[in-house]
Image (cartoon, coloured by chain):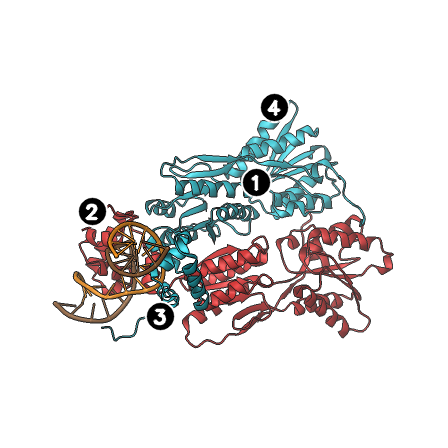
Chain colours: A red, B cyan, C orange, D brown
Amino acid sequence: MSTSPPRRRASVTMADVAAAAGVAIGTVSNALNHPERVTEELLARVHRAIAELGFVRNSAARSLAAGNSSTVGFVLVDLANSLFVDMARGAERAAQDAGMYLVLANSDISPDKQATYLDHFSQEQVAGILLTLVAGDRSGLDRARTAGRRVVILDADRVDDFCVVGTDYEQAGYLAAQHLISLGRTRLAFAGGPIWMSAIGDRLRGVERAAAETPGVTVTHLDSAEIQAEDGRQIGWRLADLPRAEIPDGIVAAADLVALGLMQALVDRDIRFPDDIALIACDDNKSAYDSLIPISTVDLPGYQMGLSAMQLLLEEIQSETHTHRRVIIEPRLTARESTIGRVARGTSAD
Amino acid sequence: MSTSPPRRRASVTMADVAAAAGVAIGTVSNALNHPERVTEELLARVHRAIAELGFVRNSAARSLAAGNSSTVGFVLVDLANSLFVDMARGAERAAQDAGMYLVLANSDISPDKQATYLDHFSQEQVAGILLTLVAGDRSGLDRARTAGRRVVILDADRVDDFCVVGTDYEQAGYLAAQHLISLGRTRLAFAGGPIWMSAIGDRLRGVERAAAETPGVTVTHLDSAEIQAEDGRQIGWRLADLPRAEIPDGIVAAADLVALGLMQALVDRDIRFPDDIALIACDDNKSAYDSLIPISTVDLPGYQMGLSAMQLLLEEIQSETHTHRRVIIEPRLTARESTIGRVARGTSAD
DNA sequence: CTGAAAGCGCTAACAC
DNA sequence: GTGTTAGCGCTTTCAG
């Protein structure tokens, strides 16, 4: 017989509930998981006991015994970027509908942290993992796969042996340029870099494709090291020093922060939007529509991507026979003042 | 003898590793948790086996057996708000230093979702919970408490029986107003509402306190329903219709989006910052420093709050004798162009 | 419809 | 230093 005190009586257990309700432990479990198998009478007694004792199910024990979990982990690249927040929102919506919980982990653009959280979720035996991949780290991913985790990757090109939800960056650039062209702009520029980043290079290619479709339309590339507001300002100042005739009349910015900075610099030099330049950004952060002159954008469909990714994941979890696929969510254009001018905006309080 | 097939051979277990390495299961556990207790030789064999088999520890089993967990859950109000993202960053930093994992859940300002995630984390038996409280839901909190979870609350006034990390909103308003006053502004206004929200009412009181300290300084309140950019614009338009002499020369905005909208509207009406109006915002989102004229702010110390909260939580987890306390992180003022004018900003690429 | 009992995979005593 | 074993709290057959 064990005389030594128990290591720690952590909390109220199902056994306690069973005792308090005067039923067997299995009945408590049934009351919770299969209420239809239990008499009204006992069900009530069990619930009363649970309430009185403040019993909380231990999901460690639960998932250990049942061999499954109801939480999905989402390893995000960058919480500060609203695109990923939108994805999280979409994913959560779908998770909720399926009775699952979504928890987030921020890899903060660090491959190490990404691997760490991937491993963590693997060890937690989560039902599945959503992942926005940071460049060049497969190790954590591979381990997750080996460990039998289901993972769906977001916003990536294609990754062998995984479902992927992506969007079409080339198409985003195409739509943006086409919008400018339809507005009669012919001297286009693409602002932002570096283009070796596929998300940016693809957009530039899309712009070029649109330009190629219409005779007389030219495209120049205004490069930058990053895609922050400061890069946009730099480009803007560079542009402002050009002879007026060489300044483009239509600009596609690689990102909305670039557009924001660009506009700040050029407004400062008395260039008017959209009169002198029609400006449209790819990627829709709040910064775009909160700017002085609301900036038109081709939105990255974050919410939709999150939603689809979660649906794909749930499908992969549920069905035995699942073939990996890549789902593309098309970007969508939102025209605002920076390209189409002032429309129905109050100029005094109403 | 059991002839029925096992329910599911989920994955590689420690027993498999032990077999492959030719050691006992306890040795594998020791190799992982107390490497110093195991011979070099066996340690190597164990690790080889782990690598070969792709073994991943099952933390459900682990925390069930050990009675503790190494994950901390953070239930956030609103992922879209950079304040909370900053908190998450700070908390994660501290968690990492302590060898813990931080996972996030977004309550999206919904009391229901907050309770849901609180319950979820309770069931998961996490080591502790960080929480930014959404108004008026104690049920989930109380359940977590009853279940023995340690929880630290962020950005709240005081909550009985919990550690709280907060900031001083009144002081933020005070600092902002003092800054304007030191710049010689006397006709102050506080923009934004509703003031029944304590974070906003407190700031207004701080502004009034600063004004009261200097004879000749007046404060008016420009109310609004919310604190979005649109509310700022509305206030701006209202202001612009006033006789010039009645327009304040110093404005404290309740939030940076309000400041942004306000500035947009007033710049549009040819009012200059800081010449005509010195503008400072409380609460530092990206929108403040990415705006056309960078806006001075009194920053909410999100990162620091997250850091402190996690430290408090770890302390509560570790020490048996812990007394709850409330830690206040002071806000800090950052002066930018909107109050002190243009300083050392390039006007052409350099 | 209810109760008893066998594990889920792991950790931490405790013997050896 | 290494192996053995008794649970952690729960789910789930499987008898009554």
Chain of the residue under the numbered disc 3 shown in the image: B
Q: Which residue is mark 3?
A: B9
Label 1 element class: loop
Q: Which residue is mark 4?
A: B213
Number of marks drawn: 4
> Do callouts 1 and 4 point to residues on the same chain?
yes
Label 4 element class: helix
Q: CA distance from mark 3 to mark 1?
A: 51 Å
Q: Which residue is mark 2?
A: A3
The residue under label 1 is which amino acid type?
Answer: Leu
> Around disc 4, counting alpha carbons within 10 Å, would you say few (fewer than 14), some (14 to 19), or many (20 or more)?
few
Label 2 element class: loop
Q: Which mark is in front, 2 or 3?
A: 2
Front in this rendered view, residue B65 or A233: B65
Q: CA distance from mark 4 to mark 3?
A: 73 Å
Asked whether disc 2 touches disc 3, contact meaning CB atoms under 8 Å apart, the reply is no
**In the rendered image of this protein, does residue B122 appear above or below residue A124?**
above
- Percent of width and height locating residue A233: 75, 51
**N-term mark: 3 or 1:** 3
Label 3 element class: loop
Q: Is residue B63 left or right of residue A38?
A: right
- Percent of width and height locating residue A284: 63, 58
Q: Which label number is shown at residue B300?
A: 1
Chain of the residue under the numbered disc 2 shown in the image: A
Q: CA distance from mark 1 to mark 2?
A: 54 Å
Say which quarter of the image contains residue B22.
bottom left
Front in this rendered view, residue B126 or A98: B126
